[in-house]
Amino acid sequence: MQAWIHGERLHLGAEAEVNSGSWFGRPAVMKIRQPRGWRHPDLDRSLTKTRMNNEVKLTIWLSGIGAPVPAIWDVDMQESTIIMEKIEGQTLIDILHAGKHTDELLKNVGKSIRILHRNAVNHGDLSTNNILITENGDAVLIDLGLSSREYELEGLGIDLHVLHEILRASHPSIGDAMDLVLEGYSELDIELGEPVAAPGGLPPSAIDVVKRLEQIMKRVRYHGG
Ligand SMILES: Nc1ncnc2c1ncn2[C@@H]1O[C@H](COP(=O)(O)OP(=O)(O)O)[C@@H](O)[C@H]1O
Ligand SMILES: [Mg+2]
């Protein structure tokens, strides 16, 4: 049996190409990080490697503890390719554009983000393209190339702020979307209790991160950035 069988191209972005296919018969995607021409080739290669390393390490660790990220099945650092589980569903941006979002689904987005934060992982690029919604309305987080370990309120607050700004700018009609995300985010700590120590320290509570987000929003309003 051939390991990887190529399907169709799903996405061609500035930094990566994503193709669907199958891996030992299971629905999979292959993400190829492509060095782009406009940067210096050496710098380019090292940035590509750093991001891929990040993505692979933290995604594997998170999927191992049952967090909502795709399972990674194969990695080729030389070719800059990752083969991972295909998440059947739609990006949050497509769901919002189609008006198919529900309160429950938006709360699930907050819950999934909180699972990362409870485990001291900052996603680093929480755009509506990097959140996949499954048929059941669960949220899976992808594209962890800019993720990092984070124990400080500010870093986690900024992670939420990025999503808030994107929702506000691109989906202004969905006024309470972020409120629902934050509701789900906070509810998870009520369900699971305060976070416990992760490798390297104690992650902040959901209440404290949401308070920090509010401060960040005020700062941005007064100072414009
Ligand atoms: N595991 C996956 N399952 C299904 N679709 C995926 C998966 N990974 C990526 N995609 C699709 O490919 C797009 C780009 O992938 P992403 O990892 O975000 O690359 P980029 O770094 O270029 O943003 C996503 O927005 C999503 O539509
Ligand atoms: Mg992306």
Image (cartoon, helix red, strand yellow):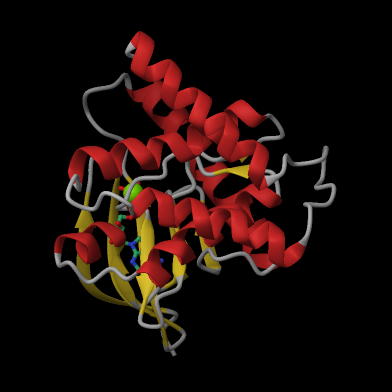
- Residue at left 35%, top 78%? 88
Asked whether, in this view, residue 59 is left or right of residue 203, the answer is left
Asked whether, in this view, residue 38 is left or right of residue 210, the answer is left
What quarter of the picture does the C terminus occupy?
top left
Please say if 43 is above or below 18: above
Viewer-proximal residue, 54 or 96?
96
Measured as percent of width and height from the top left, residue 191 is found at 70, 67
What quarter of the picture does the N terminus occupy?
bottom left
Viewer-proximal residue, 45 or 111?
111
- Residue at left 36%, top 69%? 133
Furthest-top residue in this view: 223
Please say if 109 is above or below 198: below
- Residue at left 45%, top 60%? 109
Viewer-proximal residue, 165 or 217?
217
**In terms of image quadrants, where is residue 19?**
bottom left
Q: Is residue 15 visible?
A: no
Measured as percent of width and height from the top left, residue 78 is found at 48, 47
Q: How many marks?
A: 0
- Residue at left 41%, top 31%? 45
- Quadrant where ligand 1 appears: bottom left
Measured as percent of width and height from the top left, residue 212 is found at 58, 30
Measured as percent of width and height from the top left, residue 137 is found at 40, 76
**In terms of image quadrants, where is residue 152?**
top right
Please say if 85 is above or below 13: below
Viewer-proximal residue, 80 or 13?
13
Q: Is residue 127 visible?
A: yes
